[in-house]
Image (cartoon, rainbow, N blue to C red):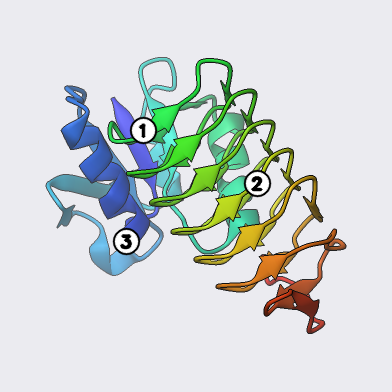
Amino acid sequence: MKVIYCAGEQARVVLDILDRSGNEEEVVLVDDDADRHGNHFHGSEIIGGTNALERLDPERTRGHVALGGNPRVRLDLLSQLRERGFDPFSAIDTDITVASTAQLGKGITINARSYVGPDARIEDGALIDSAVNVSHDVHLEAGATVTPNATLAGAVRVEKGAYIGAGATVLDHVTIGEDAVVGAGAVVTEDVPADETVVGVPAEPIGGETDG
């Protein structure tokens, strides 16, 4: 059995990936919106909130956190699944290219038309959205999020909980600090400190911290 945490739009993406990859296991969802308990979401039952996990057998059930927009919350929920004994499963689209030397963690998501290059390292709970180019030797730390059509050039490092906006480009050997945010369409030419938000071409800081 598989259980998906959070019955939102990202869950719909994960369910589609599972369907197209030939998944034959039962899939259920948990969501803390009580009004949705007992309903079905794209063919799978929402069995309850977080407490519903206690009714599942961790030895026979794997879990996934389907949450796109808040990396830190995703990591927290992934930790909760692990604390309850659930082994995370990854949702990896069949329409992607992953180099044979890339290292993929647990509980990750990789959406359609994305590329993960040689010796790239994708840590647990990271999310790579559609049509993302992750070049050679890129390191995405736990919970890092890269949204559609972004490009990470060679040896880029995206630290824990950082967020890369749609269509952004991060140039070679640049580090995006922990919980930093790169705005949509930005071109990042130099390191971004932790908790900083950058936008524009070339990217410049606007201040503020992430809400994750």
Q: Position of residue 3 (x, y in %)?
A: 34, 36
Residue wearing tag 1: 55
Please name which of the two marks, 3 or 1, marks the residue nearer to the observer: 3
Amino acid of disc 3: Glu
Amino acid of disc 2: Ala
Report the residue that reaches farthest toward the left: 43
| Rendered residue at 38%/35% (across/down) | 91
Residue wearing tag 2: 153
| Mark carried by residue 9 | 3
Q: Position of residue 25 (x, y in %)?
A: 21, 23
| Rendered residue at 32%/51% (across/down) | 11
Q: Is residue 45 left or right of residue 176?
A: left
Q: Earlier in the sequence, mark 2 or mark 1?
A: 1
Please name which of the two marks, 2 or 1, marks the residue nearer to the observer: 2
For marks 3 and 2, give the CA distance: 28 Å
Q: Is residue 63 left or right of residue 155?
A: left
Q: Helix, strand, or loop for circle 3?
A: helix
